[in-house]
Image: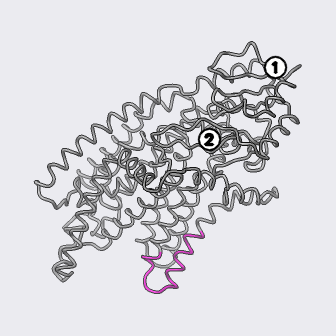
Amino acid sequence: MTSPSQGTASDPAAATFGVRTTLDWVSVIALVTIVAASAWLRWPGFRQGGFASHDVAGILYNAMVLVDGGLPYVDTLELKAPGSFYLARVLAGGGRDIACFQIWANVWALAGLIVVAGLGWRLWGRLGAVVGAGLYALHDAHLDSMDANYVTWANLPQIAAFALGIEATRARAGRPRATWWVVAGLAAGFAALCKRPDGIVLVVLMIMAWVTAGEGARARAIAVAWVLAGFVLAHLPIAAIYLSRGALGALVDGYVLSKWGLRYLGAREGSLLAELSEGALATAHFLALPLLLAAFAGAVALAARRARVQTGDGADAGALRAADPLLDPRSRREFAFLGLWFAATLLAASLGLRFYKGYFLACAAPLCLMAAAPWGLLGRRTRPRWLARVPAWILVAGLILRQSLLLDYARADRARAHDLGGRAIAAHLLANSAADERIWVWGWHLWDVYPLTGMRSASRIYKSWGILTQPNDDTWRRGSSPARFVDSDYAAQLIADLDAQRPIYVVLGSTVPAREFRELRAFLRANYRRDPRAPRIGRVEFWRRKGG
């Protein structure tokens, strides 16, 4: 008889995480080793203490606004979801400590790896946990090289939401199952609050609830309603904050409707076929190894399904279920749920057709867990003969080597400071300004200056992409077009804000189209002077208030 810890998904006893045999302990040691290796890869991120992504500066800036009693979307013209802003308020010293935030981000990412391992054990048993976690660890530190970015904070709750959904499908009908669905919806809501596209896991959960609720449209609708209730519940605390301040409309406009997000989605102009080809190339480039293994497992599952259709599921098949997970309906269904999860995250990664590396982080967990299926190439119950497996093993070995080299580069890249220019600018501003002064900077690479100085922007327009310039149009392998100034009501609002606040410094980045913004140039010439003591950093311009 199969022991509970062997973890074939067809064995009811495998629904526990029991560690009872020597092989179980070996598996646990292997998982601890995988997590330790991932921590070692990320270790420079625990110590380097700088911005690996300038987007993270936007997170910290909004945390600064919260600490000062303001609200994103009200006191900032914001494009991103608000969840990470509230996390940064707690985890980043009120938005001013990037080093602390980086440490928490890496701990958060390691927690995601642990949840993947637990989900793998729950689905496929101990070997599935080791394979799934090992594959995931080969990819997540590379895909998530911009520590503390929005994808980092959204990924853990997204993975947890699916894991909780699996628990819901296995729970007893009634209150226990409803509770699991509510908690799963809650996790999906938190994922959406951190990064809107990751909220697509809600759709996966709704389909899972509908399929597994039993007979009758009413029972299925109730199960879906429990998921939606959890999703809405996750948003209530932030909604209550905005409602109490009379700013619920700003939250709805900035987060729910997000016209800036719609502009971002519509900024690409290439043909559909070309964009789909780009997506296929990007997916294969970033996820080649788990994609190959998941495709192998999927092909085996399809072949087994055709065989069942031809021979039927009789008494003999029922007797074999304990030995072959492919004959277990639950195993097949959960493999299909993983496929649905991957398809949903791939769709989310394709929004905007940029296919940035970090977007594929959300796709890695479902794909690696599909690759870890017991009937896959690395599973205990793999079916194909050696003749079919040997070429696949050769290809897998090459892809593992490739991924190891990418991880080595990612670790070295984490050890390099990416914000030296921002630090130099911040040091100059701090040495020549009072702590309570306002500043304004223009340029993506300069957003770091706000949290590095602890100084707030003189305008709610603290970032410019898609506001003062066209939306960024770079992709995973093509650079962005030169920035062009876009004249609009926001440009006029910026000048009015600067005129009212008169920041001590206005700093213009090397690549911004400042010469095209004539009103800004006129305002600076009238009220500011170039700072001759400023450090030379490319073509960055330091304008200091006259008489300041």
The picture places residue 255, in percent across and down from the top left corner, at 67, 56
Q: Residue at x 72, y 33 (%)?
A: 516
Q: Is residue 538 magenta?
A: no
The picture places residue 434, in percent across and down from the top left corner, at 81, 23
Q: Which residues are magenta?
A: 210-229
Q: Is residue 227 magenta?
A: yes
> Taking 510 as reference, is 292 above or below it?
below
Circle 2 SS class: helix
Q: CA distance from mark 2 to mark 1?
A: 38 Å
Task: Give the number of the disc on residue 454.
Answer: none
Q: Residue at x 38, y 42 (%)?
A: 35
* Residue type, mark 1 in image: Arg
> Taking 497 as reference, is 337 above or below it?
below
Q: Nearer the viewer, residue 48 or 542?
A: 542
The picture places residue 376, in percent across and down from the top left corner, at 24, 58
- Kindly identify which residue carries mark 1: 529
Dots 2, 1 in contact, CB < 8 A: no
* Residue type, mark 2 in image: Leu
Q: Is residue 543 left or right of residue 548?
A: left
The answer to which quarter of the image holds residue 246 is bottom right
Circle 1 SS class: strand
Quarter of the figure that contains the C terminus: top right
Q: Nearer the viewer, residue 251 or 544?
A: 544
> Taking 508 as reference, is 278 above or below it?
below
- Kindly identify which residue carries mark 2: 91
The dominant secondary structure in magenta is: helix
Going from the N terminus, do you reach mark 2 or mark 1 first?
2
